Amino acid sequence: MSKSATRRILQYENHRGRQLLMVVLGLFAIIAFLWGWCEPASAAGYGSALGLAAMTGIASISDVSDKETHGNEIGYFVALIPVAMINDPMNFPQPEAGSRAIAAFQLKTGETCPVFEAHTIPTLVSTSEKGDVTTNGTNTFTIIMGGDRDVLHTFVEEFAGCKFVIMYKHIKDSVWYVIGEPERPMILNSTETKDDADGRYTTLTFTRNSVYLPLKYTPTTLPVAAT
């Protein structure tokens, strides 16, 4: 084989080698980009993770005494306010940044805040669970009304499936709590009216899909009608 032919073969092999090297480097660059895009916390390292924790403002939380963990603390009186009764529901008050309290809201002119006196202690259960994409939450408020009464039957017939804002407070406490709002209300999801050997009563169960928990109501009295 002539020297010129050998030289051309070597030049061709060098050229193909450089092309292969460029392809390999390009693949590494693409993999690094995709990894950084899909796993930013891992790509940035522990420093970024610590920075995120600082940004969310996670505070230290201490324990409380048994006095603060007693059950059955919700009072018997519960305000069940239909959204249709709220004045200017599109401007329902929202808590200020860093606060869990809302200002007063009003009912429509001529309306009176409906207060239900439960027969047993009302209960509130809020849960959250991580799904495939996001976290799902549910608020469930249950109240049992005693007796086999016309007023209860009428309420069930007329308001089953309706939207409510619920207000309750704990015993020996002047603070009212609000669960639900016009944009994401508590729904009267199920009712059970019994008149049998177990007793005569109606169970009202309100639910909503939300990760948000109750807020404090700034005034110490229930909402009144707009004037």
Image (spheres, grey):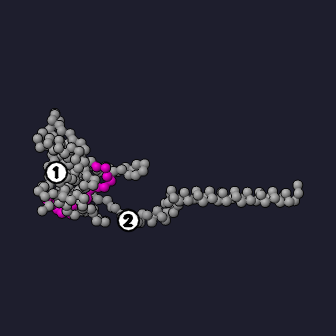
Q: From the viewer's side, name the closer residue of 148 and 196.
A: 148
Task: Give how far across and how far down residue 223 sits, in percent.
Answer: 16, 59
Disc 1 and disc 2: Cα gap in Å?
A: 36 Å
Residue 14, given in percent of the width and then of the height, sits at 76, 59
Residue at 20%, 48% in the rendered image: 122
Q: Secondary structure at mark 1?
A: loop
- Residue 125, above or below 192: below
The quadrant of the rendering that contains the C terminus is bottom left
Q: Kindly identify the amino acid type of the residue bearing the numbered disc 1.
A: Tyr
Q: Nearer the viewer, residue 189 or 214?
A: 189
- Closest to the observer, 189 or 70: 189
Does residue 75 show up?
no
In the image, 89: left or right of 4? left
Residue displayed at 15% across by 57% down: 108
Q: What's the amino acid at mark 2? A: Gly
Residue at x 51%, y 58% (from the top left corner):
37
Q: What x and y, as percent, mark residue 206? A: 24, 47
Question: Which percent across, then down, holds residue 73?
Answer: 21, 53
Determine the secondary structure under disc 2: loop
Q: Residues within 10 Å of mark 1 (few under 14, many from 20)?
A: some
The residue carrying mark 2 is 57
Magenta span includes 164: no
Q: Which segment is the magenta one?
A: 208-225
Q: Determine the residue located farthest toward the right in the rendered image.
A: 2
Residue 211 is one of the magenta-drawn residues: yes
Mark sitting earlier along the chain (1/2): 2
Q: Label 1 belongs to which residue?
A: 76
Give me the residue at 28% from left, 49% from top. 208
Please indicate whether residue 44 sits to the left or right of residue 53 in the image. right
